[in-house]
Amino acid sequence: MLSLARFWAKNPGHGAFLGVRTQADARWVMRQTETDQRAEQVRIALEAYEGPLLRYALRFTTDVETARDIVQDTFLSLCRAERVPCDGGLKAWLFTVCRNRALDLWRKERRMTPLDETQLRERPGETPPASTVLERRERADHVLALVGALPERQQEVIRLKFQEGLSYREISEVTGHSVSHVGVLLHHAMATLRRRLSEFAAEA
Amino acid sequence: MNLDANDPRLTAYALGELEDTERAEMERLLAGDESARRLVEEIRRTGELLARELGAEHCPHLSDAQRRAIERQADGGGVVSLAERRRGRCWSTAGLGRSVAGLAASLFVVATVFGVALLNFQAARGPRVVDRLSEMSSERVDHTAPPHGMERDEVAMIWEDQLAQPGEGAEGSVGSDEVSGEKAPVDGSVCYEWNQPVDSFSTTGGTASKERYYYDPALGTRSSGDIVSGDGGGGGHDWPADAKPKVQSGPPAREITLRGHRVANSPADAADNDGDGLCDSDLVELSMTETRDEGVRPKGDGNGRIVSINGDWEFDGPRTETLVPGTTPLGDEEGGLREAYDRIVDNPFKRVADDPLSTFSIDVDTAAYANVRRFLRSGTRPPRDAARIEELINYFTYDYPQPAGEHPFSVNVDVASCPWTPDHRLVRIGLQGREMAGGRPACNLVFLLDVSGSMNEPNKLPLVKEALSMLANQLTGSDRVAMVVYAGASGLVLPTTPGDDKQAILTALENLQAGGSTNGGEGIELAYKTAAESFLEGQANRVILCTDGDFNVGVTDRGALVRLIEEKAKTGVFLSVLGFGMGNLQDATLEQLADKGNGNYAYIDTSAEAKKVLVDQLGGTLVTIAKDVKIQVEFNPLAVEAFRLIGYENRVLQHQDFNDDTKDAGEIGAGHTVTALYEIVPSGTGADLPGVDPLLYQKPRELTDAANSGELMNVSLRYKLPDADTSTLLIEPVVDGGAGIGEAADDFRFAAAVAGFGMILRDSEHKGAATLDSVRELAAGGLGTDPHGYRTEFLELVELAKAVVPQATGE
């Protein structure tokens, strides 16, 4: 976060960088000519997106190590790409490359096991979430479980929207679905989730 | 109007995804709908809950080593040693005790060895490398110790290194799916795809289907299918993910082919009779090229992925319109035989003494031009009968004046010398349809889509979806759209929907899948029925048929199909036909259907053409301003000895059909132009034409006073307004001003050039002295402003034609 602050101080124009969605359609910036610019960009991206990308990559593989490889490759692509989008477009770009890489590997290894929420949390070597309030934990588990029960396409879109904060358009870029299809998927997923959540609340 | 709970806009609105007009519209609708507002609130709350809970989900981390590697790469390259690049289980079981430095050192040595081996390809080294490759590309899931004492992934990485940074040994960056350090294709988003039949490979027993992969040099591979759902369709096939797209900068210095065997890793695989762990017959074959500039590289078709795996996989080559220079698009050799064109016999010269009349129906179809272009671009000569000259000429728009009077179109005639036979004269008749001023009439459209198996090609169904999306995006609330598909069974996939419900329309388009065989007849019935049900009185009602024309099942009898369309056309619903694809294109059928259906026929081979037909010229495609338009020309025997109508061979009418309002003819759409050319032999030239013997019972016709008027000919036109049953007559006498072709309007010269081109393609006996060079010169002189670049494109086609049409030595 400190480096972010430094970066913004040096480059006030980049205030919209990271996490803030821009509405602009023109995404691609001219290729970078200076290595430090790219290096700085990569470092910032690393800091902001390492975790979320890993979380996303884990949707595609059960193995943490493979997920790490995928994410490392993604960042290496960023280092080497001739042109990268600036600011708001970078996030979607990273997720797209990550997804493609993950699918490449999946095809190569032909291993696609549906991810179970319990598996995710029982990974060795991962620190458990900080929250200790039981009630909250229970509800969190439940929400995660409900999301996990959705069909794959809907699940992916829900996560990209609510976990990663991507817009419809960005989700469309990343997944290859059309924007309207993304809307339809989200709508159905939300309807299912709302229904199940209200059933749960009714029981509680 | 109450909002439907299924409306995805509710969620989009709740999540702040709607923009401007849509949002305003939504707010307006919500204002009057209490339950919908509550729903939106619920959605919002659920969204917040999800964001909270999902956002708190724990994120894992990269290892420090990995992070350092990335940072180092960002700082400008350098070695990424194996220690920093983890590659799965192999590494984690391999030997954590090894020192990083030691490994890197041994790696370097090995890499150099391999590097040397590759650059100086020795047969002795070959098999080992090949074994690696086959391992890389195998479906082996078991990552236990690979043979030869090497880590599987170390080998993979060395290979990648060699490819990524040739000549640097183990130096250089680790490869992955992007073009590293070389120039990406000019249009950075070039994608191409190939089909890999899964059924012959699958060991997971998934559904047999084709998958498509797109490769984007910047972003890596993506697939068009939904792999994430894991429906088994992904099993069994593979290709080296680290092969790179190729942009070759110079001729290859040396070509190396490596062949290897696929590793047998399951009982379902091809036989492994000698038990060596390799499939006996499956081959992995990689072609490498070595050039001075780039060293050893995988060889593509100029820019493609390189895998060519015997039997089950073919690399089909790029199939998108953005081609990288040097590549040749796929021709569909076998399928080419299935294309069907009606035989055309050129209109001959007719002597005025025998028959002074010429009668024909106008035609606004443009398909032949797009079709001819498709052939020429793929380096083949178009079939003679595919080059319908009137369609070539009418592809272009000409600058005729807008109609001023009561008639929906203006009639413009001019005369000049004939470029290919200077003694002759050339007459140009041009009709200009009235542009739509302001709004166009509301449209009631039914898309009738062929989703049979034959449409399952990248230049067919996906292009259909794209084209219709372009069209749908221009519709408004007063328009209506429905969608009917036919393939085996036919069905209404989108009931009549208002044109502003883009969600529903685009979703329905999106969900189209190809499969089954075609039963065109039933689909057509359903489409017309749907159109009739939502008929808009006095507006534009149209069925838009999108197909490759391959009617395989059911009403295969073309005559019966045509009669069906004819009958339906009488109900006031017109038909537009959009032809797609190659190989199965039943051009003659499609043209006839459009003709009988009171509509027009266009061939769509690229997005650009789709845009031309469905966006730029939308008015013409959708809105008919005059139907059953017929032309009858009477030539003055004092001025004209013989004449020839260029093109329109399959539009010629009997003379008595001109006055007969029950006889069907062509339609003009809003803004459309129609151009027809006559080649005239002036009287006194002494044309050597076969004539009829003098009659026994009649004297030769007597001339009237009108013959002395100095007029060349008289053009009569009949047309009906779109919902009229009786025709209106227009008369336009023509005087020859004696101009030479050089003084004629740009448009006239260009049209003449196109006619000449058509005649050359058809190898017509009437082409006179026309050559591709003279055609090009004439066209270049007539380019005019060419706002869309269509005419310049024509010049390119003339050049392309030189390669495939044998030329007589020019003068």
Image (cartoon, coloured by chain):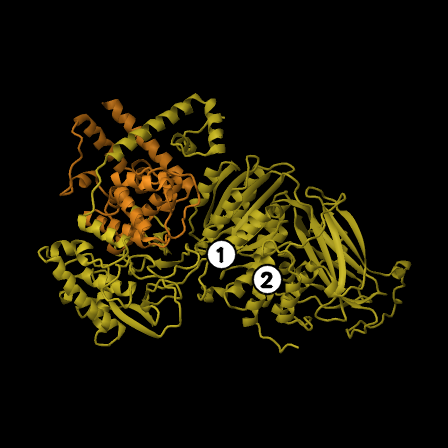
Dot 1, how many residues are within 10 Å of its Cα: few (below 14), some (14-19), or many (20+)?
some
Label 1 resides on the chain identified as B
In front: label 2 or label 1: 2
Residue B569 x, y percent position in the rendering: 62, 46
**Residue B473 visible, this angle:** yes
Q: Which residue is mark 2?
A: B794
Residue B81 x, y percent position in the rendering: 19, 58
Chain coloured orange in this rendering: A
- Residue that sits furthest to the left in the current view: B97
Of residues B333 and B782, the one drawn nearer to the viewer in this rendering: B782
Left or right of B11 on screen, residue A129: left
Work out whether B811 lies above or below A116: below
* Label 2: element kind: helix
Residue A58 x, y percent position in the rendering: 24, 45
Label 2 resides on the chain identified as B
Marks 2 and 1, how far apart at CA:
35 Å
Dot 2, how many residues are within 10 Å of its Cα: few (below 14), some (14-19), or many (20+)?
many
Q: Residue at x 60, y 75 (%)?
A: B807
Q: Amino acid at mark 1?
A: Asn
* Label 1: element kind: loop
Chain B, which colour?
yellow
Work out whether B162 lies above or below A28: below
Q: Which residue is mark 1?
A: B552
